[in-house]
Image: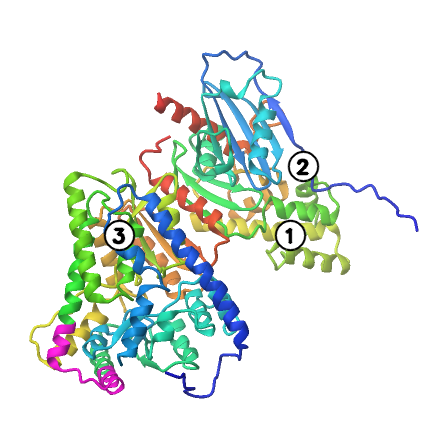
Amino acid sequence: MTKKSIREKMYVPEIPQKEIEKLRNSIKLSSKKAIADHIQRMKKTSANRPKTMKYFDEIADLFGQREKELRAAKEEGKKVIGYLCTFAPIELILAADAIPVRVSSGWYDASKLGDRIVPVEVCPIIRSTIGAKMIDLSPYMELSDAIISPLTCDGMTKLSEILSDYKQIWTMSFPRVKDTPSSLSSWTEEVKNMKERIEEFTGNKITGKKLRSAIELMQRATGAFRRLQDLRKGPPVIMGRDAMLVTQTSTWDDIKRWTEKTEALCDELEKKVREKSWACPQDTSRILITGTPMIWPDNWKLPALIEEASPQGVIVADELCSGDRLLNDPVGVDEWTMDDMLTAISERYLMASTCPCFTSEDGNEDRINWLLTKIKDFKINGVIYYVVRGCMLYAMEYTRVKRALESMDIPIYYLDTEYTREDVGQLKTRVEAFLEMLSARIDF
Amino acid sequence: MKVVQEGKKEYWRWQEYQKILSSKNWEKSDIITAGVDVGSVGSKAVVMINGEVYSWSVTRTGSNSPDSAKKAIGWAMEGTGLELDDFKYIVGTGYGRVNVPMANKAVTEIACHAKGANHIWGPTVRTILDVGGQDIKAIRCDQTGRVTSFLMNDKCAAGTGRGMEVFADLLQIPIEDIGEVSLRVDEEPEPVSCTCVAFAKTEAMGLLRKGWSKEKVLAAYTRAMAIRMCALLKRVGIEKDFVITGGQSKNIGVVTRIEKILGIKRLPMPNWRGGGLDPMIAGALGAAIIAKALHERSK
């Protein structure tokens, strides 16, 4: 399909094709190295790493098998619909026989290109996503026929505008307060509009039957995810990075196959639990990370630091929209009517979310409550609150979270960074000092 | 054309030294441990015998961490008859901690400074400000010297030892004197607006051209740095007793201003030229203490 110019470019400068190719090739090359390097390191960190991780290691290659599959599906006439934020109702995409794929960027080097359009003060995920688009770096973004962009944070809001220079972007207007009388109804309207839009675009009608099977497909994915989560509540049977990668691959993999592979992983992990074969020593500090999303492949910096640190930590849970938030909540349907299903989808995306874009008189209570529940369920020793510079909402909510956690005597550490490799030494000192503080074994 | 070779004085250069505290003879049966703190600017080593400080060294970090570590511990052993084989356990710390070849284990300087400060000033210490060569750390600890929380500045070197070296050179004032010189002003000038070393230097040059005295420029820079350190301390929360470690503990200009801003006095600095311990070695000292604990556990 030839790329058609949707309208005159408002943001993006003309870059000579030669320069685009040069930049893309060099970043793609270093990205392939980064992917291989991270997987190698993950293998090294985990004792008795599950054999079923092999599948996820392969699907983690952003320039590999999945790209080919998407291309083939498109040749057969299927549409690929990308999304930038986890509020996009992917059940609707699936029900229209289209393929959902998340397109936010984790490439460090691409963020430097985004600097040509927006100032460096802007969140690096936004800058990197812009940069990736400037040089056609992300196969999933390139293959997307349209992109859904829920307007959650300020970065996402303007990002959708900038990406409109290249792509068909479908925005979804989003209520910032969950519990006003109009918030759910207005969001449900957005969901319904999106349904029509997808139907029109794909030419496929979303029937009740199709929507029901899409919801059930995602419910099974949620079931597999929750099974994996339950396994992480006990002694560490899987390293955090492995579990995080599994979860994140669900945003680009075929979700049916992903569910099967995750169930297989859980089978293997249950066997390991019976054999008491742990991924790291049982007394390793149990860490929860919360904050700005961490996107594969480059922005795997903090999880790597934690699990390769001395003393070591193991990430047993996270509260990230690139992690545990993705699949935690199933769509709960009472009656399988179209109206009920759409309302249930609307509720699942709005009410279950703990994104800091929400506020209310009582603040973002849902996030605090979920954190406290997770801390208890996963027996967390310490929390690392991770923020990339420019991520205002997470940065601003820190003090509130800190207070809530400190009142429960849970150590929390604020760690701010950028889309760069340069601060790894400094971050290592911080992470290790925090782990030393937590570690009972380093009782000097 | 004749090139005139000027004798260039290195104003930034601070004194490297070694000190042996005790004249007592060590024996093979003693528990001899060491801490080696390879910082970004200074490398320090402390030798402990049965948990008591025996000797130490303060040296300049070179371009290579392993060599700097060797130099530091080499100086600390010089004239003592000790050899590396005599050590039961060595802990490496500081920015170059993973590159200390003789170390049995690496521990962060945050844990080490807390432990070292606890040893130097006693169990009442609760808050430590460590101003190193390229970063600033505010650390809270309990009565045993265990870290309870901490904050570190970001990767910028402003307000640290390195920044002071740059200013000593720019103003041609020996580094040992800059604290005292910065206090020679009748009235505190406005702090410089840039905390970045490079920009602050440019700003200082502008002020000098405007006719400001060296003292006034130095006061403006020192004050800006003190404000920055206090901001970090306020974020971590200050509880008495409060102490300052690292090279900047000797900068009376910084210390006086911090005390004034916070309204809290630090515990006095030991007479390190006499029989006391140098606050610059707090990290290496903590490492040597931790080394002893780890040795005893490994038995």
On the rendered structure, is A62 left or right of B54?
Answer: left
Q: Is residue B254 visible?
A: yes
Residue at the spot of label 3? A53
Q: Secondary structure at mark 1?
A: helix
Q: Position of residue A157 (x, y in %)?
A: 38, 76
User: Does A199 lie within the magenta span?
Assistant: yes
On the rendered structure, is A45 left or right of A374?
Answer: right
On the rendered structure, is B272 left or right of A363?
Answer: right
Residue found at x 29% / y 52%: A242
Of residues B148 and A374, the one drawn nearer to the viewer in this rendering:
A374
Q: Is residue B269 visible?
A: no
Q: Are marks 1 and 3 in contact (CB under 8 Å)?
A: no
Q: Which mark is residue A219?
A: none
Residue furthest left in the image: A335
Amino acid tagged 1: Tyr
Q: Chain of mark 1?
A: B
Mark before the other along the chain sequence, 1 or 2: 2
- Please tell me whether residue A187 is drawn above or below residue B294 in the rendered image: below
Residue at the spot of label 2? B14
- Please tell me whether residue B298 is drawn above or below residue B221 in the rendered image: above
Residue extent of the magenta highlight: A193-214
Residue at the spot of label 1? B221
